Image (cartoon, coloured by chain):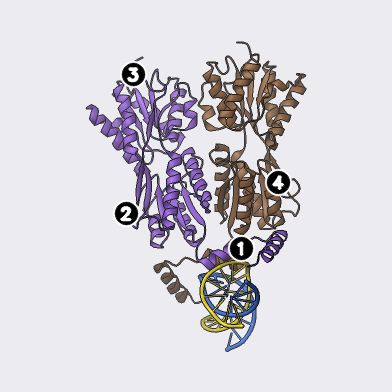
Chain colours: A purple, B brown, C blue, D yellow
Amino acid sequence: MAAPVRERVQAVAVRIGYVPDAVARSLRHRATRAVGVLISDLRNPFYADLAAAVEQRLRARGYHMILANSDGLADEEEAAATLFQASRVAGVILAPVTALATRQLVDAGVAVVEVDRQLAPGECDAVLVENEEGARMATGHLLEIGHRRIGLLLGELEWQTATERLAGYRSALELAGVPFDESLVPRSSFTAADAARMTGELLDRRPDVTAIFATSNVLAEGAIAEIQRRGRRIMTDLSLVAFDDVPWMRLMQPAISAVAQPTIGLGRTAAELLLDRLDATAPPEPVVRRLETTLVLRGSTAPPGR
Amino acid sequence: MAAPVRERVQAVAVRIGYVPDAVARSLRHRATRAVGVLISDLRNPFYADLAAAVEQRLRARGYHMILANSDGLADEEEAAATLFQASRVAGVILAPVTALATRQLVDAGVAVVEVDRQLAPGECDAVLVENEEGARMATGHLLEIGHRRIGLLLGELEWQTATERLAGYRSALELAGVPFDESLVPRSSFTAADAARMTGELLDRRPDVTAIFATSNVLAEGAIAEIQRRGRRIMTDLSLVAFDDVPWMRLMQPAISAVAQPTIGLGRTAAELLLDRLDATAPPEPVVRRLETTLVLRGSTAPPGR
DNA sequence: CTGTTAGCGCATTCAC
DNA sequence: GTGAATGCGCTAACAG
C-alpha cells in the first residue's frame, strides 16, 4: 500500500494502543507461537537453568514458553500435557516422569522433545546427558586415588538418569576389579532431607565407607548436611563427588568435586531441535542427542585414610 | 441433556482424542486462563523460587503461566509486555525494571501485580518485602557485636530493593551513632563476578573493614569467592551477612548468617492478589503488601578482632 | 491496488 | 428439551 497511508494507519494504531490479537491470529492460522515446557521442579537449579536456556532460545526465535511444574508426579504431567494440547502449542519440551504424556502428545500430532530423561524412545526427539560415562568418570576417579568402599546416593530408581548413573558406577568398579556391594547403595530418595537420612543410614550401616558419590545436586546437599551434622570432615574423613555441578559447590571449603552437566546446552539443544522440527528442517525420524559431561576435580576428593 | 447420550458422546470424544480448543474458546470468551510472569533471571534461585510459587498457585486455580526473562533489560521487558498484551493474558505478575511496561499494561486494561520491586506505585497491586527493616536488622546485628566499619555490597542502585536496603543500613548506623562512610559502599553491581571485583576493591581501599553486608544471594556468592581467594577466613577475619537466604548458605562452614525473605510467600501472595482481582474479590484501589523478613543468625558473624 | 467476504472452533442466543 | 445461527478478531482469498 501507499507509504503515507501506511504511516498514518501506523500512527493511529500506536496512538490508540492497538495490539493485534494473538488469540484470533492463532485461531485463524491454526498455530500458536507458544511452546509447552514441563519440568520436575523449578526450585532445583538444574531445572531452572534448563528452563532459562529453553526460554532464551524460544524468545530469540519468536516463541514463548508456557512453563509448568510436574513435581515429578504423573498426574500433574498428564494435566500439563492436556493443557498443552488444548492450548494448541507449537511443541512441547518435557522432562518426562511417565511415557504416557509424551505418547498422548505425539498421538495428537504435537512435536515433543524429551529432555534429561527419555521414556518414549523412538517416538520423539530427546536430549540427554552422558550419564553412564559421567558416573564412570566420578567413580573411576575415586577408585584411582584408592577408595574401595564408595557409597552411592541415587534418586528415583525408575528414572533413567538414576539407572544410567548406577550403571556407570558399576562399570567403573568392574574396570577396577572391585566387586559391587549392594549395601553401599541405599534405597532411592529424592529430596535433600531424604538424602541426609539415607546418608546417615549408610554411615551407620557401613562405617567403613571412605567416599560418597551423590548423583544429583540435591542429594549432594543432603549428604553434606548430614556429614557436617555428624562432625565428620569432607575430604579428610570422607571424600565426596557430586553429579551435577552447581555454583555453590565451588564455594565450599573444600570445594566439591563434581560431574558438570551441560545444563544450558541441554536446554538450548532441546529448543533448537524442536524449532527445527517445526521448520521441517529436521529429518522425519526422531533424533537423539547425547551431551558430554566433564569431571571437575576440586578439593572434596582425596586418598582415603588421612 | 440425557445421561445416556452424554455418556456416548463423552466416550466418542475420548476415543477420537478430542480436546476442546482453548484458542477458540479464548477468542469467544474474550479471556484466557494465561498469566504473564516476567522476572529478571530464572537462574537466580530467588526468582526461580518466586516463579515456582506463582506457578503453583496459578495451577491450583486453573490458570497457567507464560514465563519470560527480562534479564533486567528494559527492552526485553517492553517486548514481554507487548507479548502479554497480544496474548490477552488474564493478568501479569512482574518484577519490573522500568515503570513503562507496567503502565502500558495497566493502560491496556490488564491487571498487574508488581513483585519484589514497585515502580508504578498507585497504578497497580504490589507485593514487596520489608527491605529496610531487614537491612536494619542485619546491620544492627553487626553493630551490636562490635563492628564499626561495615562494607555494603549493593546491586543496581536504581532498584528499589537496593535503595531500601541502603536506607536500612544507614538507619541502623544512625541508631548506633556510627557515621555513614561512603567509601564503605562500592559502586553498584549485579553479577557474582562484579561482586567479587567490588569486594576486592573494597578490601584494598579499606583494609580496616571488619564486616560485609551483601544485599543479595548473588552478591554474597561473589563476596565469598573473593574473600576465599584472598585466603581470608569468614567470621575469624571478616564477618559476613547476606540479604536473601538460600539453601547453600546453611552448608558453608561457617554457615552464612542471612536475612531470609519469604520468597514463596511473595510468589503465592502475588498470584492470589492477581486472581482475587480477576474474581473482582479485590477492592478497586491498588493493594500493596509488605512481607516480613527474618534474620537467621549462623556462624559467619562474630565480634571483630579475634 | 483497494474493498469485501468467508471461516478458523467455540459458546451464546434464539427459535423450534 | 434440541438445533441452527451469529460473532469473537483476524487473514487469506477473492472480486472490483
The amino acid beneath tag 1 is Asp
Q: Which residue is mark 1?
A: A21
The amino acid beneath tag 2 is Gly
Mark 1 surroundings within 10 Å by alpha-carbon count, few (fewer than 14), some (14 through 19), many (20 or more):
some
| Marker disc for residue A122 | 2
Q: Secondary structure at mark 2?
A: loop
Which residue in the rendered view is the most extreme toward the left?
A177
Instruction: Give the number of the mark in front: 2 or 3.
Output: 2
Marks 3 and 1 close (CB-CB < 8 Å): no
Marks 1 and 2 close (CB-CB < 8 Å): no
In the image, residue C3 sits, relative to residue A175, either above or below, namely below
On the image, the x and y values in percent for residue A239 come to 38, 23
Q: Which residue is mark 4?
A: B99
Task: Work out how far the residue at label 1 is from the one at label 2, CA to CA, in angstroms.
Answer: 38 Å
Task: Work out how far the residue at label 3 is from the one at label 4, CA to CA, in angstroms.
Answer: 58 Å
Q: Work out whether residue B37 or residue A232 is closer to the camera in this orientation and state it.
A: B37
Of all chains, the one bearing label 2 is: A
Task: Work out how far the residue at label 3 is from the one at label 1, CA to CA, in angstroms.
Answer: 65 Å
Of all chains, the one bearing label 1 is: A
Of all chains, the one bearing label 3 is: A
Residue B126 lies in quadrant? top right
Instruction: Give the number of the mark in front: 4 or 2.
Output: 4
Q: Are marks 2 and 3 on the same chain?
A: yes
Marks 1 and 4 close (CB-CB < 8 Å): no
